[in-house]
């Protein structure tokens, strides 16, 4: 149990376009999901906390208008990178919380040309 | 931003060797310490959630200890096998509930047959 999927696993897009990443909890319901980002040789850094049915909470320095998060159901949260730029190229990974643990998806590698 | 340090950054051992890594974290406002095992192209797998000072947890050949007063945790692998090759992450959870996690950069373990 406690499987989280993420789609797509990798994406290449042109600068200025938007990209949507989906995070699904497959066998449990998650009131809270988290979105992290990892740059090369760095640690996973929390971008935002997504709560079902309410607005996401963004970490300091993360632009909420650029990284749109929607958590419309207890099994799905989406992250949309709007007007992507090369500096947004990174590894994005989500997690879903259940009891006292976070369960992670496999991540999405985004490359913006 | 809280500082979570892991050492060593990478480790190469021979099959059958025992090994251990360190995670250091702030000793104040502690809620939990999480260990994850992360293989390339897969989801990070939760190994342990540790909450009490002096906690020792074991899963097969892997065990972990926790010292919240001095802010460190050790992860031990006994009789390493090639399938243990992965990046081992620790994450500090502050406050009073499961929430945002502060990750270390990980220890990359390679076990040679």
Image (cartoon, coloured by chain):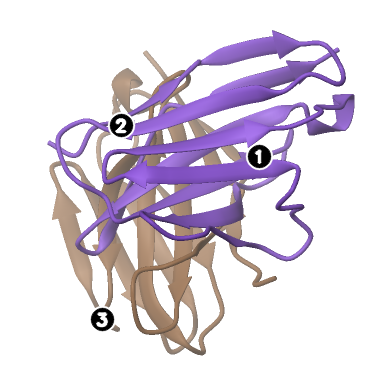
Mark 3 highlights which residue?
B52
Callout 2: few (<14), some (14-19), or many (20+) C-alpha neighbours within 10 Å?
many
**Residue at image x 62%, y 21%?**
A109
Q: Secondary structure at mark 2?
A: loop
Chain corresponding to brown in the figure: B
Q: Which residue is mark 1?
A: A38
Residue A30: image x %, image y %?
26, 50
Above or below — where is B15 with respect to B49? Answer: above
Tell me if mark 3 has few (under 14), some (14-19) or many (20+) residues whose alpha carbon lies within 10 angstroms of its own.
Answer: some
Chain letter, purple: A
Real-space CA distance between mark 3 and mark 1, rounded to the nearest whole angstrom:
29 Å
Q: Chain of mark 1?
A: A
Q: CA distance from mark 2 to mark 1?
A: 28 Å
- Quarter where residue A36 is shown: top right
Establish if B102 lies above or below A110: below
Picture coordinates of residue B34, whole percent (x, y): 36, 59
**Residue B87 badge:** none
**Most foreground residue, A71 or A41:** A71
Dot 3 and dot 2 within a common chain: yes
Mark 2 belongs to chain: B
Q: Is residue B101 above or below residue B12?
A: below
């Amino acid at each position: 149990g406690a499987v989280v999927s993420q789609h797509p696993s990798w994406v290449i897009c042109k600068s200025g376009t938007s990209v949507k990443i989906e995070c699904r909890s497959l066998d449990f319901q998650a009131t809270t999901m988290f979105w992290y980002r990892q740059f090369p040789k760095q640690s996973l850094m929390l971008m935002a906390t997504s709560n079902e049915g309410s607005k996401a909470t963004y970490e300091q320095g993360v632009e909420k208008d650029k990284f749109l998060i929607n958590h419309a159901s207890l099994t799905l949260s989406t992250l949309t990178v709007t007007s992507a730029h090369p500096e947004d190229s990174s590894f994005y990974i989500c997690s879903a919380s259940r009891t006292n643990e976070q369960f992670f998806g496999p991540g999405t590698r985004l490359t913006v040309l | 931003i809280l500082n979570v340090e892991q050492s060593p950054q990478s480790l190469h051992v021979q099959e059958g060797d025992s090994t251990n890594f360190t995670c250091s974290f702030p000793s104040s406002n502690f809620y939990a310490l999480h260990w994850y095992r992360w293989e390339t192209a897969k989801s990070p797998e939760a190994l342990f959630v540790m909450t009490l000072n002096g906690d020792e947890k074991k899963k097969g050949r892997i065990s972990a200890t926790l010292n919240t007063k001095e802010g460190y945790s050790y992860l031990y692998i006994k009789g390493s096998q090639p399938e243990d090759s992965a990046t081992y992450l620790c994450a500090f959870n502050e406050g009073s509930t499961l929430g945002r996690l502060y990750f270390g950069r990980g220890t990359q373990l390679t076990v040679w047959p």
